[in-house]
Image (cartoon, helix red, strand yellow):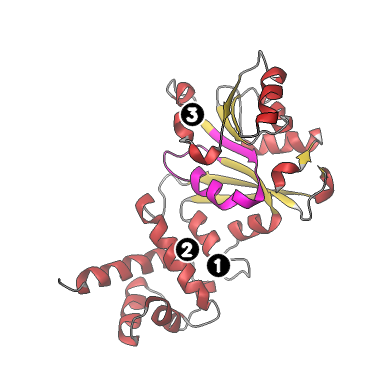
Amino acid sequence: MLGQHFLVDRNLLDRIAGATGATAGEVVLEIGPGQGALTEALLDTGATVVAIERDERMTAALTRRFAGRDFALIAGDALEFSWAELVAPWTASGMPWRVAGNIPYYITSPLLDRALSPPLPASVTFLVQKEVADRVVAPAGHDDYGALSIGIQAVAVPTREFLIPAGAFRPPPRVDSAVLHLVPRAVPLVEADQIGALRQLVTSLFSYRRKQMHRAVREALGVDGTVASAVLETAGIEPSARPEVVPVDGFIKLLAAVQKYRGEHQATP
């Protein structure tokens, strides 16, 4: 996992810290500080850093290294905490908060889900596998466009900032990495309680990525052609279009159309 591969190039670390947008008067929640290389770069922006580290071998060294600086350490698993509550002592006084981290590949998706769950930070900056970053930022029609792209773009504006080659890490991983920067939308395209339903719908439809939407809707939702035509018309999606070219807002309209149809035709007990 990426958490076992340490980035020590100070120039790259400073670029990552810069990509977060963090400044004095802000608090950064860092996920998995490890040996503290990125932590130091983040502290040097003038921001306060609250770090979550689960590896007991790292926690004592981190506490010693950053004694006397605007640094707080939380020991434990990042997925088991409410992130907003961890930074509440600072945000309660009006400090904006951000999320950053050189995160393990194997929990990238759950960490992205947690980072984009309300209450939302000002931004999220993660060092991730290059292929993941490519999928997150991919537009409709691109080969990398899929459920991950749609799920994140519905609630945030993503940017792939720059690449970091495998050779920059010690020891080097087998893949290149990229800095992924997410800015939550002031008004999400989908309500928080609908994100799960949207992802489920999109994942089902992308099982028929190369098929026309009319067939994809029939197969994925288990409905007949008449229903498929009706919900696609309501959503403003061409029946002959393929899932891979339907934009994010098209899937959101389709979700609303499907839910409306189901609500109107729900069997009575």
Marks 3 and 2, Cα distance to the nearest angstrom? 32 Å
- Where is residue 223? Give x, y as percent: 34, 81
**Residue located at (37% from left, 69% from top):** 254
Identify the amino acid type marked 1: Ala
> In the displayed structure, would residue 62 be above or below residue 171?
above
If you read the primary sequence from the N terminus, does the residue marked by circle 3 or circle 1 appear first? Answer: 3
Q: Which residue is mark 1?
A: 140
Is residue 251 or residue 172 the one in the foreground? 172
* Magenta stretch in the rendered image: 98-123
Marks 3 and 1, Cα distance to the nearest angstrom? 36 Å
Is the C-beta separation of discs 2 and 1 under 8 Å?
A: yes
Residue 193 counted in the magenta span: no
- Where is residue 53? Give x, y as percent: 62, 32
Label 1 SS:
loop
- Dividing the picture into quarters, in which one does residue 31 lie? top right
Residue farthest along the right direction in this orientation:
167
